[in-house]
Image (cartoon, grey):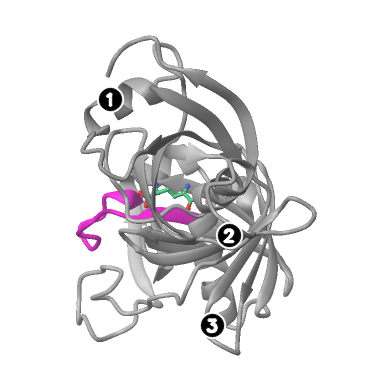
Amino acid sequence: MKISKWHGLGNDFILTELSKSSSFDIRGAVERLCDRHFGVGADGVVTIRHLSGNAFEMRIYNADGTEPEMCGNATRCVGLYIKRRMLARGDEFELRTKGGIVRPKVLENGTVRVDMGEPRLLRGEIPVAGNPAEQAREVKLRADGRDFTAFCVSMGNPHAVIFVPDIEAVELEKWGPVLECDPQFPKKINVEFVEVRSPGMVRMRVWERGCGITMACGTGSCATAVAGHLSGRTGSCVTVLLDGGELLVEHSAADNHVYMTGPAVEVFRGELVEKI
Ligand SMILES: N[C@@H](CCC[C@H](N)C(=O)O)C(=O)O
C-alpha cells in the first residue's frame, strides 16, 4: 500500500489514494498506523478517491480509529496532493466529505485557501442536547470543579469554543478529555480554548475528539473565528495562532462561508511493508 505523510501546522496525516472501484476498508488498521512507536505515527489517516473531473471523495479517521465528518487541515493537504500528482486540472478542487462539500484552492505561493462552507449553529445540527432549533452560544460546562461557557459550532464536525482570559492557565490535558465527553454532546466534541489578543488575532489551543491535544485544528480555527465574530469579540477576519503555526480565517459577510488559508506540507512518500 502506497502512502504519503503530510501535515498542516503539525497536525499530521497518513494519506492514501483509493481507486474508484476499491472496496478497501482501512478502519481496522488506523490505530496501528497512527501509533508513533509501532506504526508510521500520525494524528489521523486520510483516504481520497477520484470521482470525476475536479471532484474527489475525502474520508478522515482519527488516531483512535473513529471516523469524524471533516478535517480542515487535511483539506489543505489533499488540495496540494491533487495538484502535485496532477490528478485533476487547475488549482481548485471539490472534496466530498461526510460533513459536506469543501473547496480547496492552491494559491500561487503554495499555500491553500479552502472554502469550508457555512457554519452550522443550531443544536440539532452540531449536535448539542436541548431544543434542536436553538443556537448553542452559551453552553454551561463543568470540568475539574471549574465552570466554563462554550459557544458551539459545527464546521461539518462539532466544536465547543471556550474564550478564556489567559491561555497559559488552561490545563488542556486535564479539562479537554472531560469536556469532550460531556453528556450534552451526543457525538462528543472537539474543544478549543481561545484567548483574544486583538479583534484580528486570537491564540487557540485544541483538545481533539479521538486524538487528544494536537498542534493545530483547521475546523477548530474556523469554529473559533465564527464564534469570535458572532459574539462580537473579533472582526470577521482573524489570524489564529496555534501551537504549530498560523491560519488565516475569514467568516464572509457576502456568503456566510468560512474561508481558511494556510500551509500544507508533504513530509515523505513510502510503501507499507505489512499488508493491511
Ligand atoms: N484536525 C482536524 C479535525 C480532525 C477531526 C476531529 N478530531 C473530530 O473528531 O472531529 C482539523 O484540522 O479540522
> What kind of residue is marked 3?
Leu
Residue 153 sits inside the magenta stretch: no
> What kind of residue is marked 1?
Ala
Specify which label sits upstream in the sequence, 1 or 3. Answer: 1
Of badges 1 and 2, the one in the foreground is 1
Question: Where does label 2 land, which residue?
Answer: 194
Q: In the rendering, which numbered label is found on residue 29? A: 1
Question: Considering the numbered disc 2 on the image, is that residue within a helix, a strand or a loop?
Answer: strand
Count all numbered tags in the image, as a single digit: 3
Q: In the rendering, which numbered label is found on residue 162? A: none
Q: Establish if 181 lies above or below 91.
A: above
| Location of residue 49 in the rendering, given as x and y in whole percent from the top left corner | 38, 46
**Nearer to the camera, 83 or 89:** 89
Question: Considering the numbered disc 1 on the image, is that residue within a helix, a strand or a loop?
Answer: helix
Q: Are marks 1 and 3 in contact (CB under 8 Å)?
A: no
Question: Where does label 3 land, which residue?
Answer: 230
Residue 149 visible (yes or no): no
Segment tinted magenta in the rendering? 179-192
Residue that appears at 54% across and 29% down: 5
